[in-house]
Image: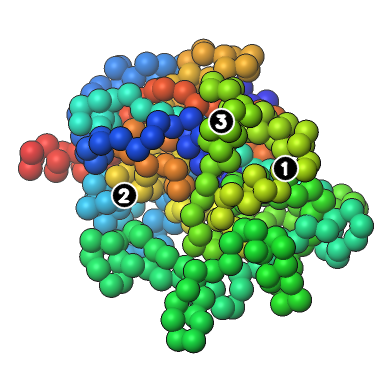
Amino acid sequence: MIPTKAILRPARIGLALLLLAACAEKPSEKPAPLLTLAPVEFSKLSGWNGDDQSLALPALLRSCARLEKQPADKPVGPDGMAGTVADWLGPCQSAKSLPAGDAEAARRFFEGAFQPFVVADRDEPQGLFTGYYEPELAGSKTPDATHSVPLYRRPDDLILVNLGDFRADLKGDSIAGRVIEGTLKPYYTYQEIDEGALKSKDLELVWVADPIDAFFLHIQGSGLIRFADGSVMQVGYAAKNGQPFVAIGKTLLDQGELQKGQVTTQSIKEWLRSHPDRAASIMYMNRSYIFYREIKGDGPIGAQGVALTAGRSLAVDTKLMPLGAPIWLDTTWPADTPEADQPLQRLVVAQDTGGAIKGAVRGDIFFGSGEQALDYAGRMKQPGRYYLLLLRAVAARRAATS
C-alpha cells in the first residue's frame, strides 16, 4: 500500500532526528542556509504528468481551511514569501469545487493557479529527504504486569519560554524548564522521568507494554495506542522537556556497534532488543522527553495545525519554507524496498516541521501508520530536490520587485 500513488496517514518529529543525525558529518563550517528560488515551467518538473495530483487535494484543502480562519492580511511563510491569506482565498475556493478523484482537473487547477520555483541553497538544488511515520503500540488505560511504561501528560510545573518574546534575533527558539526557588532550571531528563521523577503526580495518560517502542514513540511525537478490546487512542505531542535530543544511532555507530551505511530504525531496534542489559543506558543518552495528549478526530496534527495526509504531507524547515504551500517532490524510493532507487515524484503539501529538518532543501515525508509505513520511513534517506509552488499572483509580485 505504501508504494502506490494513494497512501495513508501521520506522525510528528520524524525518523530524521534518529537517522540523519546518526549518519551526519561532524559540524562543519558550512555557511548558513540561503534559500534561492528560480521560476521554471511545469514541463520541467520530472514526472509531473505521471502523478495523480488529485491525491494531494485533501491535504491542500486542510491547509486552506486553516488559512481561511486567519486574518486576511496575515503573511504566509517567512517574510510572506507565499503571499498573504487574502491571496489564498480565491484559489482555495476553486480547489473546493474540484471533483474528487479527477486527476486531470486537479492538474489543470495547479498549473493554472501556481508557478513552480526550483528551491536551492546558495544555488545548490540537491538536498536530503527522509521519512517519518505513526507508530502503533499495545497499551492499557490502567497499569498491569504487561503494560507498565507510562506516557505522561504535560506537567503543570513545565515552563515553556519563547525566546523570541525577549529578543528578536531568537525568534523561533525556545527553552523549557521548571522553577526552583525562583530560578528557571532544566526540566527532568528522559532517564529521570523514566526512573520515576513524575510518578504519583497523576499525569499518566496511558500505559504501554514495550519501553523500546515507547522510546521510538518519543522520537515520532505521536502514535496510536491499541487496547485489548480493539479500541484505539490517538496520542499526540503536547510539550517536551526542553532537554537536548541525542541520536542513539550515532552513539551506536561511534561505539562500533553498528556500521556506517547500516544505521536504520530497524537495525537500531534490533540492537536494543538483543542487548537488554545495555538498552536502557543507550536510550538514556537521549535526554529529550515528549509529553502527550489524546487527539480526537483526524490526526496526527502537524505544525500547521492540520491533520497530516500519508504520502502527501511534508515536513520542512519553517524558518525558510511556507507551511500550506504545495511542493513538487523529486527524489527516489529508499534502499531495501521493492521500489528501491526508482523515482519518487509527487505533489505534496508543506504541513509539518521537525527538530532535524533544517536547511533550504530538506524534507521529511510522512509515510502513514503501522509497520509498513515504518519499513519505508525507517529506510528513507535519499538525495533529491523539490519545487515550491507559489500562487501566480504572488509570483508576479516577486518578479515585479526583483
Which residue position is annotated with label 1? 278
At 25% from the left and 25% from the top, the residue drawn is 124
At 24% from the left and 41% from the top, the residue drawn is 32
Q: Callout 1, which amino acid?
A: Arg
Query: Furthest residue to the left?
Result: 401
Q: Are marks 1 and 3 in contact (CB under 8 Å)?
A: no
Left or right of residue 249, residue 275 in this image = right
At 32% from the left and 29% from the top, the residue drawn is 387
Mark 2 to mark 3: distance in Å? 30 Å
Task: Identify whether 349 is placed above or below 372.
Answer: below
Q: Nearer the viewer, mark 2 or mark 3?
A: 3
Left or right of residue 62, residue 265 in this image = right
Nearest the viewer among 173 and 83 is 173
Can residue 378 be seen here? The reply is no
Rate crowding at label 1 as few (under 14), some (14 to 19) or many (20 or more) other CA atoms within 10 Å. Answer: few
Q: Nearer the viewer, mark 1 or mark 2?
A: 1
Q: Indicate which disc, 1 or 3, sits on the residue closer to the N terminus.
A: 3
Which residue position is annotated with label 3? 253
The label on residue 112 is: none
The image position of residue 61, as x and y in percent, is: 47, 46
The image position of residue 126, as x and y in percent, is: 33, 24
Q: Callout 3, which amino acid?
A: Leu
Mark 1 to mark 2: distance in Å? 38 Å
Rate crowding at label 3 as few (under 14), some (14 to 19) or many (20 or more) other CA atoms within 10 Å. Answer: some
Q: Indicate which disc, 1 or 2, sits on the residue closer to the N terminus.
A: 1
Query: Furthest residue to the bottom?
Result: 181
Can residue 401 be seen here? The reply is yes
Mark 1 to mark 3: distance in Å? 15 Å
Which residue position is annotated with label 2? 319
Q: Quadrant of the N terminus?
A: top right
